[in-house]
Every structure is written in structure tokens, then in C-alpha cells.
Image (tube, helix red, strand yellow):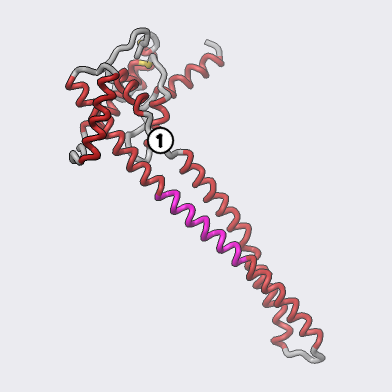
Amino acid sequence: MDTLQKEKFRSWEIAQDFSNLALTPDSFHAFYVKFVNLRFPMMVAHLLELRYLINHAADGYKELPLTPDYRQFRESLRNALDSFSIDNSRHCERMLKILSLLRDIHYKHSILSRDAEQRLRSAMADNRSKRQKAVHYGLFFVLAGVCSGVLWLAIPEPMVLIKLLPAIYGYLSWYYFHKLPGLEQEQEKLTSELNDVLRRRVNSLNWKTLIHKLALVLGYKRVAGVEVFHSEQDHDHRDRSVYH
């Protein structure tokens, strides 16, 4: 196997590996993007890891009370499952619980993302306010220094205080202008963090893709021509799986 083939195989292997992920609101973006872009066939070791991750999270999940909204949501999902020909009642209930889990995690993920965005935007607004004040104060003290220098030259025998004013105002103007590079760096950092929050936000769930791939991964559905897993190369990588 040449270098290019090794790199392609390594990228394919990483794309299938869920061993370093968790089904939590904070890491939901990484799991969701990886899952909806999952390509079959999978290595058996990675398939087992993914099944363990999903089933372990579902086993520990306590479903929400059957409010009207939640009941309507379950009915919509049940109709969708029927359209995917998942007729086994036990499999259907399991899928409903897993999909409800994903909905709940996505909701919490959205709240965390929204709170992080608001915090960063508030910090950015505060930073802009500090920069404006620094510029205004810096210019004010420059003008005050110029005026005190003119006053010094206009008075035949100025007092010591008047002689010191230009130096004092000069220092104050330097102090405020010296703060600007640090504030600009902080603004760039906040902007980068905000872009990362927006990039990692999952705005909506593709339920059709989730149901289809969950059914295949969990073995609840078979599709003609789709091989969910193969084991040709699994023997070389079996020891890498923590759940195999």
C-alpha cells in the first residue's frame, strides 16, 4: 500500500471511529456531523463502538413526561419509522427513545451555544466600548498636553506644576493608546471564539438521515445493496477498539 492509499485509509478509519466521542450537549456537534456523514461499510470494531455509545447513552436516558408537545413529537417519529418499514415493536420503541435522547441533547446543545454566543457578543461589545474610551481619553490628553505646553510658553515664569502638566498629560495619553493593541488582540480572540461557537452549532436535525442510519447501525433494517460492515481488515485493527 503506497503513501496516498495509506492516507486515504487512515482518513476513512478516523471518519468511522467514534471511540473518542460522547453523546453530550458539549460534544454534540462532533457526533452529529460525524454520524450524518457516516459511510458504509464500517469496520466491525467501529460499528460495535458506535452501537455501544448509542445504547449506553439510551440506557441512562430518562424520557420526558408525555406532554402534548412531546406526545406529538413521538407520534411524528412513529409515523416516520413506519415509513422506513421498522415494524418490530421493540425496535420501534428503542428507536423512539434514542431519537428522543438526540432531541433532548440537541436542545441542551442549542441552549449552551446560545448562552456562549450571548456571552461572547457581550464581551465584544464591552471591548469595543473600552477601545472607544481609550481612543477618546488618549486624544483628550494629547490635546490637554498641547494646551498645557502652549500655556507654559505663554507664561514668563510658569509654576513647577505647569511645567509638569505636559509630561503628565503625555504619560496619560501614552497609557490609553498603549492599551489599544491589547484590546484589539482580545477582540480578535473573542471573534475567533464566536465564529467557532457558530460553526459548531447544530441548527436543526435531519431526522430522515438520523432514522435511516440509526436503523442500519443498530441492525433494525436491511437495505438491498448496502453492506453495513465488513471484516476484511478488522483483524489488523481489532486491538484498537476499547469495546470490541
Residue on which the image places disc 1? 29
Residue at x 21%, y 23% (from the top left corner): 92
Q: Which residues are magenta?
A: 115-134
Residue at x 23%, y 38% (from the top left corner): 70
- Vertical position of residue 157 compared to residue 33: above or below: below
Residue at x 35%, y 25% (from the top left corner): 208
Query: Residue 169 in the image: x percent, y percent?
Result: 68, 76
Residue at x 41%, y 27% (from the top left corner): 34
* Residue 140 located left or right of residue 193: right
Image quadrant where one finds the C terminus: top left
- Vertical position of residue 62 compared to residue 118: above or below: above
User: What kind of residue is marked 1?
Assistant: His
Q: Pointer 1: residues within 10 angstroms few (<14), some, or many (20+)?
A: some
In this view, the residue in front, 20 or 229, is 229
Query: Residue 236 in the image: x percent, y percent?
Result: 39, 13
Query: Residue 230 in the image: x percent, y percent?
Result: 36, 11
Q: Is residue 117 magenta?
A: yes
